[in-house]
Amino acid sequence: MAAGTDAPAGTTIAVGSLSFSLTNEWTAGRFAHLRRALTLVPQSVLKVVDGLSFQVKSQTSGGEDGEYDIDKHRVIMYSSAWQANAARYGGSEWPVYAIAHEIGHAIDRAALRKAWSTFQGSKGTSSDEKALTTARSESAGRYVNKKGTFELEVPLAGKEGAFRKAAAKDGVKLPSKNATVLEGTPTEYASHDWEDVYAESFALYTTDPKLLELLRPTIYAYFAKRYPRKP
Ligand SMILES: [Zn+2]
């Protein structure tokens, strides 16, 4: 595809044997940001989210500039991501960072997506349910059975899993039992939610790994070991 051409719905982006796609049209400028983000994300990460699709929506969320839909395995970017100032962030333009952040949510929840898919194909016995509810995202999110409906919960307290332990070594903590804000998160945005601690750390690892290594060395080491930049 020539530079400067809008990318229609159904466009696929091949990265080696992996494939990503657009569910609707992306302008040339926005598509260039997506391609840039996919170039920066280590291949060891892309393998885990193979088949991910991308959609752009002309709306603002009032909060985050995008979201990850685990059921559709889709990143939805809001046009607000391109309305922010064009300042560089973590070594990249803001939309590239924002896309990397959403890919971070997809990678964080990969184990939950797999567990959900296994559960959907099961007979739904109590042991099947146990396999689902004991699965954890990297940020320690889990499915909880709420009167027959499985909801994703991510407790703010606790150090379950290697990611939270790494973050704790770097000073990320809940200052008291009833606190609602984490201290020591790599960005202020990440302070309300462990999934955003993960996604913000991942976006930094993707767009400016040296900065993450400087700011939060143990989190950096966690990603470098699990998702090396060179396979
Ligand atoms: Zn987020």
Image (cartoon, helix red, strand yellow):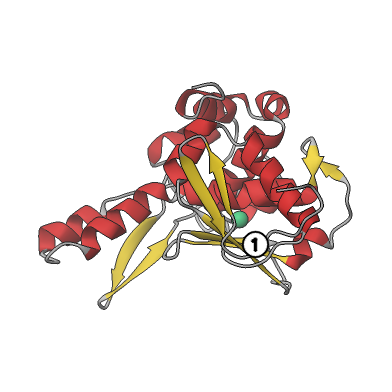
Quadrant housing residue 41: top right
The answer to whether any part of residue 174 appears in the image is no
User: Residue 201 location, x and y as percent?
Assistant: 62, 39
| Disc 1 Cβ-to-ligand 1 distance below 8 Å | yes
Would residue 85 be found to the left or right of residue 132 on screen? right
User: Residue 44 location, x and y as percent?
Assistant: 48, 31
Would residue 84 be found to the left or right of residue 49 on screen? right
User: Residue 106 location, x and y as percent?
Assistant: 50, 51
Q: What's the residue at 85%, 42% (across, down)?
A: 88
Residue situated furthest front in the rendering: 2
Quadrant housing residue 162: top left
Q: What's the residue at 79%, 49% (across, down)?
A: 94
The answer to whether any part of residue 163 appears in the image is yes
Element carrying mark 1: strand
Quarter of image, ligand 1: bottom right
Q: What's the residue at 77%, 37% (across, down)?
A: 90
What residue type is disc 1 on? Gly
Q: What's the residue at 46%, 28% (across, down)?
A: 226
User: Can you say whether 137 is above or below 219 in the image?
Assistant: below
User: Residue 177 location, x and y as percent?
Assistant: 49, 53
Would residue 83 be found to the left or right of residue 162 on screen? right
> Which residue is the site of mark 1?
66
User: Can you say whether 131 is above or below 36 in the image?
Assistant: below
Give the number of marks: 1
Quadrant housing residue 116: bottom left
Q: Residues within 10 Å of mark 1 (few under 14, many from 20)?
A: many
Would residue 14 be found to the left or right of residue 111 on screen? right
